[in-house]
Amino acid sequence: MPYGNWATVREAADHYGVSRQRIHQLMAAGRFGECRKLHGLGQDLWLIPHPYKRVRETTGRPRKTKEKG
């Protein structure tokens, strides 16, 4: 990891076993906390805090609440 306490999108994708695009989706949803974007020579580089602190999202439909009456 050449960036100290930061990892690249590709490193995060390899760690979680998902695609690079999925990491970008999770970043857009705020699941990795504060990510940084470096402007380089002709391209941008996203950095994700390492060790990873991925916030799990709840999936599925919320349970119905029964009203007593």
Image (cartoon, rainbow, N blue to C red):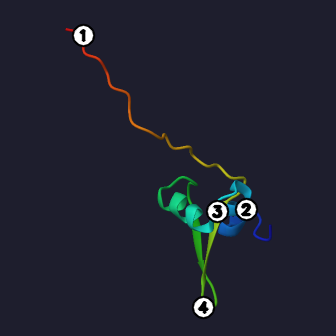
**SS assignment at label 4:** loop
Instruction: Kindly check if marks 1 and 3 are in contact, taking CB atoms under 8 A apart as contact.
Output: no
Badge 2 is on which residue? 14
Badge 1 is on which residue? 68
**SS assignment at label 2:** helix
- In the image, residue 2 lies at what x, y percent? 80, 71
Classed neighbour count for the residue bearing mark 2: other residues with Cα under 10 Å, few (<14), some (14–19), many (≥20): few
Dividing the picture into quadrants, the one containing residue 68 is: top left
Q: Earlier in the sequence, mark 4 or mark 2?
A: 2
- In the image, residue 58 lies at what x, y percent? 49, 40
Q: Earlier in the sequence, mark 1 or mark 3?
A: 3
- In the image, residue 27 lies at what x, y percent? 53, 60
Which mark is nearer the camera, 1 or 3? Answer: 1
Indicate whether 29 appears above or below 45.
above
Q: Earlier in the sequence, mark 1 or mark 4?
A: 4
Task: Give the amino acid type for the residue marked by disc 2 in the picture.
Answer: Asp
- Residue in the picture at 67% in, 62% down: 13
- Residue in the picture at 63% in, 85% down: 40
Instruction: Identify which residue, 67 or 51, lies in the foreground.
Output: 67
State how far apart marks 2 and 3 are (Cα).
13 Å
Q: Is residue 20 visible?
A: yes
Q: Earlier in the sequence, mark 2 or mark 3?
A: 2
Residue 42: which numbered mark, if any?
A: 4
- 58 horizontally vs 9: left or right: left
**SS assignment at label 1:** loop
Task: Give the amino acid type for the residue marked by disc 4 in the picture.
Answer: Gly
Instruction: Kindly check if marks 4 and 2 are in contact, taking CB atoms under 8 A apart as contact.
Output: no
Task: Give the amino acid type for the residue marked by disc 3 in the picture.
Answer: Ile
Badge 3 is on which residue? 48
